[in-house]
Image (spheres, rainbow, N blue to C red):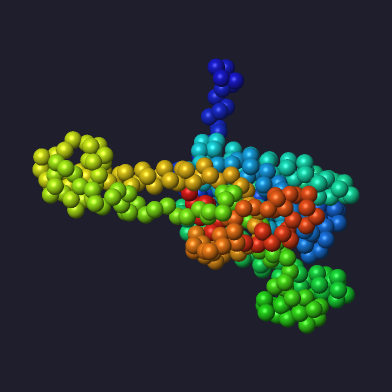
Amino acid sequence: MAGTKFAYVRNFELPDSVIPDTYLVVRIDGKGFHKFSKAHDFAKPNDAAALELMNEAARYVMQSLKGQVALAFGESDEYSFLLRKSTTLYSRRNSKITTHIVSLFTSAYVWNWSKFFPNQPLLHPPSFDGRMVVYPNDQVVRDYFSWRQADTHINNLYNTAFWALVLQGGRTEQEATKELEGTFSADKHEILHTKFGINYDQLPPIFRKGTTLVWTTNTSEPLTPTQDAGSSTTSPSKTTASHPGLAESSVDADEASQGPVLANAKDEKLRLKIERKRAAKDAKKQEKRDKKAQLSTLRTLHCDIIGQDFWQAPQVATQPAQHGSAQIPQSARDVSSSQPWNDPVRFDGTGLGVSVFLD
């Protein structure tokens, strides 16, 4: 079209690149999934195989965009994908990124259907919509994912109580809705326990906590936060031979040689201080790049991400294999396992969130 008289139509396209150095979250939602789940006879209140199919589609997105997507969280018929603030995917164009992720997810959902529903043909194609939201910093990102997991708790508790009343209590859907109207969490727990003998806290974590996908290392050593930029990376015993009066600057000969030695002692001390800070900053950036390069294992988790344990590096322990970043059993990666969502290795995410903000 370029070079023709019709090329002017491109002037109607609006630029939609999002601002740099911000986190991008793309959230997709199933379109008409109430009808879709009913047509395919999904179990109520939760169909574990259907949720694991969602997880498999999300894993495909994560693997296709490795290095771009750092974290994903899913519940019911929705999934949220966090893109690193350093991403340059599609020049950070909102429409391109969103539609690409929705397309990857939808195609993977259809492609993998028969793995999880071998006896149930796909009766009509599923569809998903998507939106992108831009977040400015780490804390807001954490709050976003805390919000989605809190929503998982609220929705699942209601649905569990609702379908217990319908399927086990003989209520109609209208009667169950009326009975739960105005109730609080404690009331729903009480209904489940006293009327149906259901201990909500003992239900599978995939239902109560959703699914978290995160890249990590496949070793027994968890990723730890990078060394503080103010920490000295040189030996405090070293001094500059040409300026013995500057011993307190703790700078080695290599660092001192990075620039011309200034005649004025105060200026030289300031120069060394600036170069030391620059070297520490560069070392910190390189350490983060090295750690990002180590992220070779995609973990599937059903763990708490509202508290601190997921986001902070674990304390040094005598048995590191118990941490969430330990060597991963094959069953954790084997979708052919009959019930992978019940594998205990998925329940411990201690320290794995450290890798999310390696930008």
Q: Which residue sits furthest bottom? A: 194
Name the residue at 55% across, 24% down. 8
Horizontal arrangement in the rendering, residue 7 relative to residue 21 (left or right): right
Which quadrant of the rendered structure holds the N terminus?
top right
Foreground pick, 83 / 227: 227
Name the residue at 22% across, 45% down. 272
Horizontal arrangement in the rendering, residue 285 relative to residue 76 (left or right): left
Residue 261, by quadrant, is top left
Residue 197 in view (yes/no)? yes
Horizontal arrangement in the rendering, residue 272 relative to residue 22 (left or right): left
The image position of residue 240, as x and y in percent, is 18, 44
The image position of residue 305, as x and y in percent, is 58, 62
Foreground pick, 285 / 183: 285
Name the residue at 67% across, 76% down. 185
Foreground pick, 104 / 310: 310
Residue 19 in view (yes/no)? no
Foreground pick, 106 / 19: 106
Residue 176, by quadrant, is bottom right
295 relative to 207, above or below: above
The image position of residue 133, as x and y in percent, is 55, 50
Horizontal arrangement in the rendering, residue 288 relative to residue 228 (left or right): right
3 relative to 239, above or below: above
The image position of residue 89, as x and y in percent, is 54, 38
User: Number of numbered discs present?
Assistant: 0
Name the residue at 72% across, 53% down. 331
